[in-house]
Image (spheres, helix red, strand yellow):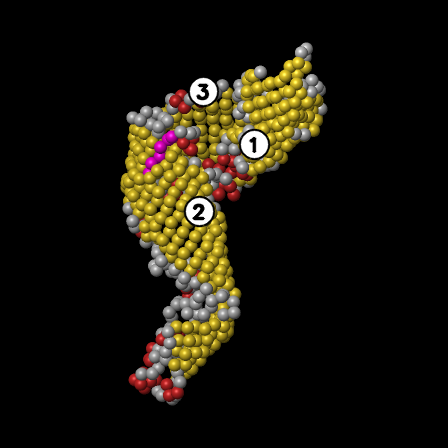
């Protein structure tokens, strides 16, 4: 015996022994929502029910039910049914069974509860509440709205308290309201009704002080009757905004070709403004807009869609849009852009064919500041943005006109509009790189990116990294340096591109520009422009802090180091012992002793920090021995290369007059007074 019920196929077989004994029953149910198997007699059927994976919606609103299997037993003679721990017998429910679900990827559990004549659902997780399913629908559900605000600009999210959406259910519909929601310090309120008796209908209004957004849906017609927004709602992205925005819209039967409406803009901020209107008549969208906001002169005028004959100007940039958007290959839209954008030359053409049909194609080509673009998108099988497949890429032989830095770049694209894949290769400021990229759900990631720091880079070495790049940074990296700070390091990059939080740690594996400091443990952090470097080891320990772009060399603000290390260079072997520091407010501190051999002979020097840096040294041996004293201002790191303070460097060589010393040839540094202290070791 077989049949269908609600798109599910039922098959049953058994053995009938006259006059009325049924045994060896086998029951199978298959369909889009569940599958069930049971065997046994009429009084004792046993088996399983498998709920098949289901989902509806996308992104944070995606509600999914994972596949799950529950034990089943029942009796045809006793009108008894048991699924998991939930039992129905003689018209009454008892027990409970849990079903897993997820909303926007956040897992939860819904308990089905039996309470006498009533069957209830009590979800926990992203959705909470309690609802009566039988004998009549009723109850209340709620969900927090914070997870749904991710697409909003960060500045808007900072001013928004999302609150909760509360749905009160009844047999014929639901009432929707916001609870605890606020924006810019004012309450956000929603008063909406949804009904499903005799067809779907909905009506509601979202309000904020000075603003209202009504929405109606009935009989297939969507309308927005008299929406009005106070321009102050734009304050997070447009400080000081004043004025008003309004909208009237009707889409009869959901048919865009019959849609009509008008949106008007009248916004002012900081002595600048935007005004005009968007008009929709019989599905034809046209614009007449002007703006000087953000100090940019913008003008848009003419039909936009589906017929197009519009002109857009933005400062020194001019664009034209011509043609028609339609389902046929002969229906083409062409956008031509030329001129200069922020001083960079632009010459681009974008052509779309059959834009509303199943074989739609879009191609873009041209140049931007010398970079060549050749991009394509073609619509294939599937629904929505996932049906659009990408191809092409971009290349720049010289990045200076585009980004202001020396280098080159090659970028190839693939994937779909919901899952973009790219491969970027090139070189920037002496760093060669190769990075596979992906863009899914608004998150840009890389995995297995590699970089080689060549001779033109400040330091040499290699790096590998992977993780998220945008909208927030969440990268892990391994770095191997062969110069500068030679060693192997691991790190994490967090924060945002505007304010990165970079942490690196590792151990020096070689000399630090001649300083024998191998084995020193390094820990560094860069937060925005502020950095901190901590060194721990027998040869070198202490801390360096600074802010990139500040007045001192390298942005240095404070350093406190203790050295017990050798400095080795050709014909030079020095031992450095003691503390030495510098602070932007108080100058130099500490007392560092430097003893050893230089090309000009033995050296015994003391650097004493007392605000200013005082230097005393004995240089050379025998008849050529000389003594040197000098002082450097506390502001020396703010003026690297500065001469000593007055009095200048002074010296004495075994009673020989300074005028004679230069003629006698040694030490030659004595005739170079006024040069920085570091030149002492070079004299011979």
Instruction: State the residue at coordinates (32%, 52%).
Output: 407
Comparing 118 with 278, the one in front is: 118
Comparing 66 with 358, the one in front is: 66
What are the residue bounds of the magenta stretch? 375-380
Dot 2 falls on a residue whose secondary structure is strand
Which disc, if any, is residue 67? 1
Foreground label between 3 and 2: 2
Instruction: State the residue at coordinates (47%, 47%).
Output: 467
Expressed as whole percent of the image width and height from the top left, the position of residue 529 reads: 45, 56
Q: Does the magenta segment cover residue 344? A: no
- Please count the marks in the image: 3
Mark 3 vs 1, N-terminal side: 1
Instruction: State the residue at coordinates (44%, 36%).
Output: 243
Q: Residues within 10 Å of mark 3 (few under 14, many from 20)?
A: some
Instruction: State the residue at coordinates (65%, 29%).
Output: 84
Give above or below for 11 relative to 632: above
Which disc, if any, is residue 253? 3
Q: Quadrant of the C terminus?
A: bottom left
Q: Is residue 547 visible?
A: yes
């Amino acid at each position: 015996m077989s049949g269908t019920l609600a798109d599910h196929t039922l098959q049953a077989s058994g053995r009938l022994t006259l006059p009325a004994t049924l045994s060896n029953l086998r029951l199978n149910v298959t369909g889009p929502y569940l599958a069930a198997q049971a065997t046994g007699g009429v009084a004792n059927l046993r088996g399983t029910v498998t709920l098949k994976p289901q989902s509806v919606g996308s992104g944070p609103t995606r509600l999914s039910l994972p596949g799950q299997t529950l034990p089943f037993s029942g009796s045809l003679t006793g009108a008894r049914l048991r699924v998991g721990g939930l039992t129905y017998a003689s018209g009454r429910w008892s027990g409970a069974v849990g079903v897993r679900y997820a909303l926007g990827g956040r897992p939860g559990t819904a308990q089905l509860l039996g309470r006498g004549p009533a069957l209830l659902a009590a979800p926990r997780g992203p959705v909470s509440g309690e609802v009566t399913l039988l004998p009549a629908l009723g109850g209340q559900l709620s969900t927090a709205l914070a997870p749904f605000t991710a697409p909003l600009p960060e500045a808007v999210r900072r001013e928004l308290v999302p609150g909760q959406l509360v749905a009160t259910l009844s047999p014929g519909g639901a009432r929707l309201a916001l609870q605890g929601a606020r924006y810019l310090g004012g309450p956000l309120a929603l008063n909406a009704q949804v009904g499903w008796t005799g067809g779907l209908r909905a009506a509601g209004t979202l309000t904020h002080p000075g603003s209202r957004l009504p929405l109606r849906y009935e009989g297939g017609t969507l309308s927005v009757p008299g929406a009005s927004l106070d321009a102050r709602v734009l304050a997070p992205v447009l400080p000081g905004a004043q004025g008003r925005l309004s909208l009237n819209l009707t889409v009869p039967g959901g048919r865009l070709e019959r849609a009509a409406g008008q949106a008007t803009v009248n916004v002012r901020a900081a002595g600048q403004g935007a005004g005009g209107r968007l008009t929709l008549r019989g599905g034809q969208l046209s614009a007449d807009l002007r703006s000087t906001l953000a100090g940019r002169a913008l003008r848009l005028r003419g039909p936009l869609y589906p017929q197009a004959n519009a002109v857009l100007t933005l400062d020194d940039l001019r664009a034209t849009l011509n043609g028609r958007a339609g389902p046929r290959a002969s229906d083409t839209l062409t956008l031509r852009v030329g001129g200069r954008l922020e001083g960079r030359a632009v010459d681009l053409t974008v052509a779309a064919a059959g834009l509303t049909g199943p074989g739609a194609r879009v191609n873009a080509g041209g140049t931007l500041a010398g970079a060549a673009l050749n991009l394509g998108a073609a619509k294939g099988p599937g629904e929505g943005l996932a049906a659009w497949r990408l191809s092409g890429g971009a290349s720049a032989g010289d990045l200076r006109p585009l980004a202001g830095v020396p280098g080159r770049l090659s970028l190839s694209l693939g994937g779909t509009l919901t899952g973009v894949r790219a491969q970027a290769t090139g070189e920037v400021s002496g760093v060669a790189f190769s990075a596979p990229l992906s863009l899914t759900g608004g998150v840009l990631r890389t995995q297995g990116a590699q970089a080689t720091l060549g001779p033109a880079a400040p330091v040499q070495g290699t790096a590998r990294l992977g993780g998220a790049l945008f909208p927030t940074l969440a990268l892990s990296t391994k770095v191997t340096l062969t110069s500068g700070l030679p060693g192997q390091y691991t790190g994490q990059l967090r924060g945002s591109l505007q304010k990165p939080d970079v942490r690196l740690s590792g151990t020096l594996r070689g000399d630090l520009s001649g300083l024998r400091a191998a084995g020193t443990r390094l820990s560094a952090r860069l937060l925005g422009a502020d950095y901190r470097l901590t060194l721990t080891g027998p040869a070198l320990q202490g801390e360096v802090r600074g802010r990139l772009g500040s007045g001192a060399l390298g942005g240095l603000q404070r350093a406190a180091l203790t050295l017990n290390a050798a400095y080795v260079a050709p014909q030079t072997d020095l031992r450095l012992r003691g503390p030495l520091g510098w602070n932007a407010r108080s100058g130099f501190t500490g007392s560092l002793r430097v003893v050893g051999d230089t090309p000009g002979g033995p050296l015994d020097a003391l650097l004493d920090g007392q605000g200013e840096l005082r230097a005393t040294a004995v240089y050379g041996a025998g008849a050529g021995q000389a003594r040197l004293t000098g002082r450097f201002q506390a502001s020396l790191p703010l003026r690297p290369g500065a001469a000593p303070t007055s009095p200048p460097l002074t010296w004495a060589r075994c009673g020989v007059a300074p005028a004679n010393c230069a003629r006698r040839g040694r030490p030659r540094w004595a005739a170079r007074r006024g040069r920085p202290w570091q030149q002492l070791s070079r004299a011979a």
